[in-house]
Amino acid sequence: MKRKSRKRNSRKKNRFPGSPGIWLFFLVILMGELLFYTWCRVQCVEAGYKISQEKKGWSRLMTIQKNLRVELAGLKSPERIARIARNEFGLVMPGPRQIIIIP
């Protein structure tokens, strides 16, 4: 009868089945997974910040491009070209006798 009571006592002392090495292994795996998950989240947040910065830069460049297109249209306007031709180069519109029509 003494043997049976010893077996019961030894079973009660060992609460977790298996050796402590297995539990340590699972704990290490769990910690590794948590570190990997944290690293992935940090990378995701960093990528989000970079995307946001690039969108701001793109928006700024689009505004500059729009302003340059407006300026180019003003520089190409026929009124401006005619004014520069008259004032800076002394050119005038040709008279009716100066125009030659080529058939």
Image (cartoon, grey):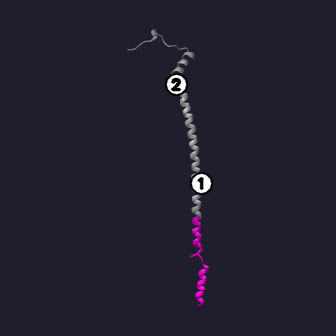
Quadrant in which the N terminus appears: bottom right
Q: CA distance from mark 1 to mark 2?
A: 51 Å
Quadrant in which the C terminus appears: top left
Q: Is residue 32 above or below residue 80?
A: below
Q: Position of residue 18 (x, y in %)?
A: 56, 75
Query: Residue at label 2?
Result: 76
| Image quarter of residue 11 | bottom right
Say whether residue 51 is magenta: no
Secondary element under disc 1, as helix, strand or loop, is helix
Q: How many marks?
A: 2
* Residue at the image point whose x is 58% and y is 61% from the top: 34
Please provide the residue range marked out in magenta.
Answer: 1-30
By secondary structure, the bulk of the magenta-drawn segment is best described as: helix
Q: Position of residue 69 (x, y in %)?
A: 53, 30
Query: Residue at label 1?
Result: 42
Q: Earlier in the sequence, mark 1 or mark 2?
A: 1
Q: Is residue 66 left or right of residue 100?
A: right
Q: Position of residue 97 (x, y in %)?
A: 45, 8
Q: Is residue 95 above or below residue 31?
A: above
* Residue at the image point whose x is 56% and y is 39% from the top: 59
Tell me if label 1 and label 2 are in contact, CB under 8 Å: no
* Residue at the image point whose x is 54% and y is 33% from the top: 66
Q: Is residue 85 above or below residue 28?
A: above
Say whether residue 4 is magenta: yes
Secondary element under disc 2, as helix, strand or loop, is helix
Residue type at tag 1: Val
Residue type at tag 2: Lys
Crowding around mark 1 (Cα neighbors within 10 Å: few <14, some 14 to 19, many 20+) is few
Query: Residue 9 has which mark?
Result: none
